[in-house]
Amino acid sequence: MKYLDEYRDPVLARRLLDELRQTATRPWRIMEVCGGQTHTLVRQGIDELLPAGMRMIHGPGCPVCVTPLETLDRAMAIAGRPGVILTSFGDMLRVPGTDTDLLSLRARGADVRVVYAPMDAVRLAADRPDREVVFLAVGFETTAPANAMAVLHAARLGLENFSMLVSHVLVPPAMTALLDDPDCEVQAFLAAGHVCAVMGWTEYEPIAARHKVPVVVTGFEPLDLLEGILMAVRQLEDGRAGVENQYVRAVRRSGNTYAQDAVRAVFRVTDRAWRGIGALPDSGLELGEQYRQFDAARRFDVGGLRPVEDAECIAGAILTGARLPTDCAAYGTRCTPRHPLGAPMVSSEGTCAAFHAAGRTPTRSTA
């Protein structure tokens, strides 16, 4: 397949690894922000091929994983209402809430449906005026434009039976919070290419300057990641700290201004709780006043929620890169993709799921 196999060329991968070994003189620690990048690194074994001592720190780049438990519990309370169709992406259905998950709720009779785009939920609402259709909207800046367009389209159609339960999170505040932690070990970042395709990279420039950390916008294929790591190491070795773009085929500095305009028209920045991490100021999006009629949290009063995290799950430490999945006593035994204790074992971008799929064990893991 053109432009895919080319980025998985083993000969070029070996050359990049050789150059990386020749360039690195210290055991640098680099965080990849995106869960999709984590899966490539672990699946291809790239994290185990790096120069001795160099370590990839897996960051909180899984939007499903950081969706607050309270939001999930609220979604399930809404889904249990008669006359409601709750829709979301497939990953969300198996994320454990306090007592159950959306898939189990569907098995008990709730009308919970998987959609492939938020516009599918809008069309469903237009086709079923007798039902309340709710879309559980999660994700980083990557999915925000599509969700914004769905709200704009629902407004144009005058739909009164469509709403969104919004749990959008933003990457730069999370990076800043990690760097502000006195125990932070991150010395450079690989920024998520798809987020930057929407937002560009101007938001990362103050972070790099203030904290003196290189940031490299990076794609998702093996050669993308190897080149991104090499670019970050070159900056570290040279004592530089700026933003560079490895993902030149998809990202430009200004991003997609049309998508940004749609997001600004529909959403506004707000404080947001991150599952396992806690509340971060100005780290999320919520519907603006003009579109509050589409806010499912306002439309459905579900009463007081009392979310309770699983006491054994160490998802918070995994999402911040402080611990590895293999550090968890439940990993691979009481917590598996089939029976997860926490969201990182469920999502296609979760670190625990990546380690489990790659067959990583406590004795073999070096990432």
Image (spheres, rainbow, N blue to C red):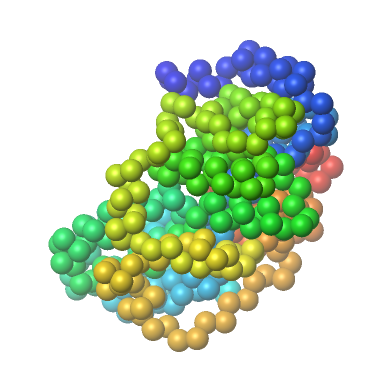
Q: Split into 4 quadrants, where in the image is the N terminus?
A: top left
Q: Nearer the viewer, residue 305 or 190?
A: 190
Question: Would residue 105 be visible to someone looking at this image?
Answer: no
Image quadrant in which you'd find residue 294: bottom left
Residue 3: x and y, percent?
Answer: 44, 21
**Residue furthest bottom in the image:** 303
Residue 324: x and y, percent?
Answer: 74, 50
Image quadrant in which you'd find residue 342: bottom right
Residue pictured at 44% horizontal, 51% vertical: 141
**Residue furthest left in the image:** 157
Residue 47: x and y, percent?
Answer: 71, 34
Residue pictured at 49% horizontal, 58% vertical: 169
Q: Nearer the viewer, residue 146 or 134?
A: 146
Residue pictured at 50% horizontal, 86% vertical: 304
Number of labels in the image equals 0
Q: Split into 4 quadrants, where in the image is the C terminus?
A: top right
Residue 10: x and y, percent?
Answer: 62, 17
Question: Would residue 211 be visible to someone looking at this image?
Answer: yes
Task: Judge left or right: residue 345 versus residue 220.
Answer: right
Residue pictured at 39% horizontal, 75% vertical: 297
Residue 143 lies, with reference to residue 221, above or below; the image says below
Residue 360 lies, with reference to residue 245, above or below; the image says below
Task: Judge left or right: residue 29 versus residue 128.
Answer: right
Task: Judge left or right: residue 305 versus residue 133.
Answer: right
